[in-house]
Amino acid sequence: MSKADKISGFFWLFFGILVSVESARLGLGTLHRPGPGFLFFYTGIFVTIIALIILTRAFLTKKMEGTRESIFGASRNIWKAVYVLIAIFLYALLMEPLGFIPVTLLLFLFILGILERKRWIVAVLTSIAVTVAAYLIFETALHSQLPKGILEFLRF
């Protein structure tokens, strides 16, 4: 692990704690009647846990000798990050007109199939599984109203 892991780990640890504290002030509510801070609180907890894992690994593993570390890594990784940010921006823009299901499916296909260059069968099956799971969690379990977009006629 590297200095970059330590820096990012501390940043996300602080950010996760800050989000959790501030969202708790908004009110958590209950599982069946979530308050305005409910989702953000648990997202902050999740970010904090991941940051602690990264920090633990960063401090417990020795730096590989002879490797030059950079906070941004190879330039290819920077471009991947830029492409992911653009994809997420387009995801937000296209969510309402196209709907949750097609846009989420396309986002994961892009990330897995094009950026990560996974085999297409793996990319397609994983994208479908993630989209279905996210739909079931948000629409069915949490009773959120996700945008239907072009699939409005299906009324599911």
Image (tube, rainbow, N blue to C red):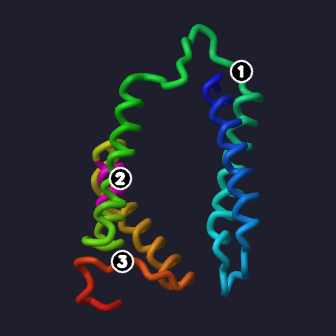
Kindly identify which residue carries mark 3: 147
Compare residues 106 and 125 and report the one nearer the observer.
Answer: 106
Q: Judge the density around disc 1: few (<14), some (14-19), many (≥20) Cα neighbours within 10 Å.
A: few
Left or right: 86 as drawn, with respect to 57: left
Which residue appears at 65% of the width and 51% of the height?
A: 47
Which residue appears at 76% of the width and 28% of the height?
A: 59
Q: Which of marks 3 and 1 is nearer the N terminus?
A: 1
Q: Which mark is residue 62?
A: 1
Q: Earlier in the sequence, mark 3 or mark 2?
A: 2
Quadrant in the rendering for residue 60: top right
Amino acid type at circle 2 is Phe
Q: Distance between the residues labelled 3 and 1?
A: 47 Å
Secondary structure of residue under mark 2? helix
The magenta segment is: 106-113
Is residue 112 inside the magenta stretch? yes
Q: Residue 89 carries which label?
A: 2
Q: Distance between the residues labelled 3 and 2?
A: 16 Å
